[in-house]
Image (spheres, grey):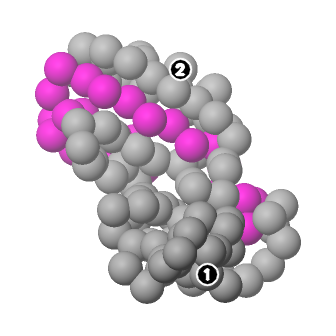
Amino acid sequence: VALDTPARLKESVGGDVVTLTTSDNLRAGVELEELHLQPRIEDGLIRFEAPEGAVTVANVFRHLTPEILSVDLHKPSLEDVFIHLTGREIRDDEASSADKMRSQMRSGGIIGPGGRRMS
């Protein structure tokens, strides 16, 4: 997906990560776009990045019509970088069978016939 140091990858997100839930996420999404933000709505959450997260959240509280039910503001993680670049979360259930087996073998978790560890 991308290759760089963790710090630089996190900087590429473009600011703090804000996650909201509201009483009407679709309407809130439209209103956030009017505030020149780029919200993504998925799994009942509204997610966007903002250069100055605390200032942006205060502005969102003043302008959003739907009731804000929850808010989370944090510095970007590598998971946030992945979401920023791909538009989706990293999920174990999306890994292929071969990926899962490789991961288990690396951790020493595959036991073969006769109780021997497979390498």
* Residue indicated by mark 1: 118
Picture coordinates of residue 117 (x, y %)?
Answer: 64, 74
Rendered residue at 53%/20% (across/down): 58
Q: Is residue 65 left or right of residue 97?
A: left
Quarter of the image that includes the C terminus: bottom right
Disc 1 on helix, strand or loop?
loop
Q: Position of residue 10 (x, y in %)?
A: 72, 59
Q: Which mark is residue 58?
A: 2
Residue 110 visible in rendering: no
Asked whether residue 53 is in view, the answer is yes
Q: Would you say 43 lies left or right of 83 here?
A: left
The disc labelled 1 sits on which kind of residue? Met
Look at label 2 and name its amino acid: Ala
Q: Nearer the viewer, residue 85 or 108?
A: 108
**Residue in front for this viewpoint, 76 or 111:** 111
Quarter of the image with the N terminus is: bottom right
Q: Which residues are magenta?
A: 9-37
Give me the residue at 67% from left, 68% from top: 108
Q: CA distance from mark 2 to mark 1?
A: 55 Å
Q: Give the mark toward the camera: 2 or 1.
A: 1
Report if residue 10 lies within the magenta region: yes
Where residue 100 appears, as percent x and y from the top left, is 46, 73
Image point (53%, 75%), residue name: 114
Q: Earlier in the sequence, mark 2 or mark 1?
A: 2
Residue 72 sits inside the magenta stretch: no
